[in-house]
Amino acid sequence: MNIRIKKRKGIALVAAAVMASFVIFGGCSMGTAADNTVGGMKPAQTVDVSGLSDARNTPVVRAAKAVGPAVVGITNKAVARDWFNNPVETEGVGSGVIFRSDGYIVTNNHVIDGAKEIIVSLSDGRSLKGKLIGQDEFTDLAVVKVDEKDLPTATFGNSDTVVVGEPAIAIGNPLGLEFQGSVTVGVISALNRTLDVSDKRVKLLQTDAAISPGNSGGALVNADGEVIGINSAKVAAAAVEGMGFAIPINTVQTIVNELIEKGYVARPYLGVSVFDPATAARYGYQLNIDKGVYIFRLTLDGPCGKAGFQRGDIILEIDGEEVNSVAELRTKIASYKVGDKVTVTYDRNDTKRKTEVTLEEMPQDDR
């Protein structure tokens, strides 16, 4: 196998002038502090539906009434540096869903990532300080807690029973807290959609319900008033309306339980850093390989280091399944548990080899 990796001279330029489509995570960011502070927030609209006719009291109305009070606004206050390296307070707004009455809230990791302070705006108008319990960058999920009791909660459904074509109701804060508790309606467009985001491959529910910046972390609800997903992203393109995506609630429940228990998700790892041709190009390198992923760094006391791997080896397969990108390798390893043994097929100097590797828990610094 012919391998050539070299650093490109000069500044790497972006070749494409226009991207056909791109992923937008729905956090709404602002450069200045908002007027709403702890203790002051305009309550979301609530309507008594008991007097509505059957024609007006639709499943959408009932679902919004059931879940709406449990959807909150989440403000991420962080500190960034301006061009002169001076600290500047920044603020971003997303959504969250209360799933335990004692103040536990699920949201997206990118909504709270890097926060110096978290403010949770309840549907009744109150604003409370939030505490980060745990976060998982891989699934883009996080758990925040407020010190309050008897809060309204949302009921989680079963995302494994979701079918294409059924109603999908998105509840959140598009474009910020000014539009808190907004409801948009569509259908489930597809199941198990796979997106490659930041060298991760994730499976999501797809919906045509409008998901705008600020909706991240909000609820995707079925016609029975059950949360079937946590809104995460949309894909925008020049010729089409944006497609919304949500993390299936069954995945959410597994992750949040572990975040509450440990503050993080224990994930297996190989102890290697790898390039595929696409990721190498992003860092200004040219990598000539036909298949697999190239090991450019490894931890000597990590799983692959202990198994005798070297820098320059090319991982071809995990348990007989080809891996040809960073995302494929990460997704494949994430499907195992810490302590599992995997057979790694790799190329070294044009010779194919196989070695058994015992997966270990990923160190916290590598998550």
Image: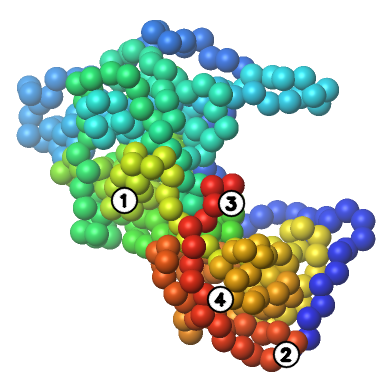
User: Up-down: is 32 above or below 161?
Assistant: above
Quick one: quadrant of the N terminus? bottom right
Label ID, residue 366: 3
Local SS, label 3: helix
Distance, label 4 to label 1, CA atoms, is: 26 Å
Residue ID for mark 2: 350
Residue ID for mark 4: 323
98 to the left or right of 315 = left
Can you give x and y, in whole percent of width and height, for residue 102 in the image?
25, 25
Label ID, residue 201: none
Residue 201 visible in the picture: no
226 to the left or right of 120 = left
Of the residues under marks 4 and 1, which one precedes in the sequence? 1
Query: At label 4, which amino acid type do we have?
Result: Val
Local SS, label 2: loop
Residue ID for mark 1: 254
Residue 202 visible in the picture: yes
User: Up-down: is 47 above or below 132?
Assistant: above
Query: At label 2, which amino acid type do we have?
Result: Asp
Judging from the image, the colouring scheme is rainbow
Residue farthest right in this picture: 10
